[in-house]
Image: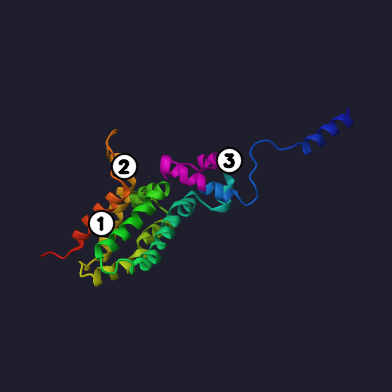
Amino acid sequence: MLAMASTKREAGRHAPRTGPRVRRGTASALLLDAAQELFAERGPFATTTRQIADRAEVSEDLIFRYFGSKNALLQEAVVRPIVELLQSVTPRWEAAQGTWADNDHERFVNFVGQLFDLVYENRTVAMTMMQVLISGPAGIDDLAVRELAGQMYEPLAPMFADYLGRNGFRDNDPAILLRLIMILIGTSAAFLPGAYPDGVAVPDRDRIVDELATFIHYGLRRPG
């Protein structure tokens, strides 16, 4: 009997593990993907770390091992990717300047189009980012997250201020103008398709971008 019990213990010790197994080095990526999905579906404040771990099919402890906290995971899954995406706009804008050297409207259409596409193609993180911005300090009590969110506009600020000055637009407060423009473009990309009832054709991307560019362009002109 003792021999049989010992054999069973040995068999149990070497029995194959059941349930999902995560390949080494992939848990953090799975958690980032799951966090992006759930933050967009339920909001960053209603989502729990347990729900994120369950969606990723990993242990909840791994969230704290890799990221330290839910706020830090929010920072890496949502805020940092948006900042990095915006940083990618500047070199593309600069590269396109010679293409429409004599057509200021087309240059601005290009700029608006890049921001529109960036938000539209990354709606999952963009929608969550909007909730972070709406909540302000009352919603996010993590200083690092708020500071990084505040940097969202910084990658485009020098380019935008230079553009205003070179073209004779209102440039007394580029910071607020840039924020208003980015919020307008971002909300249009995220919400405009849903603003049309069923059966009514939504304007295509080029029409929306051209209307936005014209609207903003006239708004930047000096009075008189």
Spatial CA distance of label 3 from label 2 is: 33 Å
Q: Dot 2 corresponds to which residue?
A: 193
Q: Earlier in the sequence, mark 2 or mark 1?
A: 2
Please check the rendered image and state whether residue 41 is part of the magenta-colored stretch, yes or no.
Answer: yes
Residue located 29% across and 59% down the image: 109
Which residues fall within the magenta stretch? 33-56
Residue located 35% across and 57% down the image: 114
Q: Which mark is residue 92?
A: none
Predominant secondary structure, magenta span: helix
State if disc 1 and disc 2 touch (CB < 8 Å).
Answer: no
Q: Earlier in the sequence, mark 3 or mark 2?
A: 3
Residue located 33% across and 56% down the image: 113
Residue 48 in the image: state x and y as whole percent: 48, 41
Please check the rendered image and state whether residue 127 is part of the magenta-colored stretch, yes or no.
Answer: no
Q: Dot 1 corresponds to which residue?
A: 213
| Amino acid marked by disc 1 | Ala
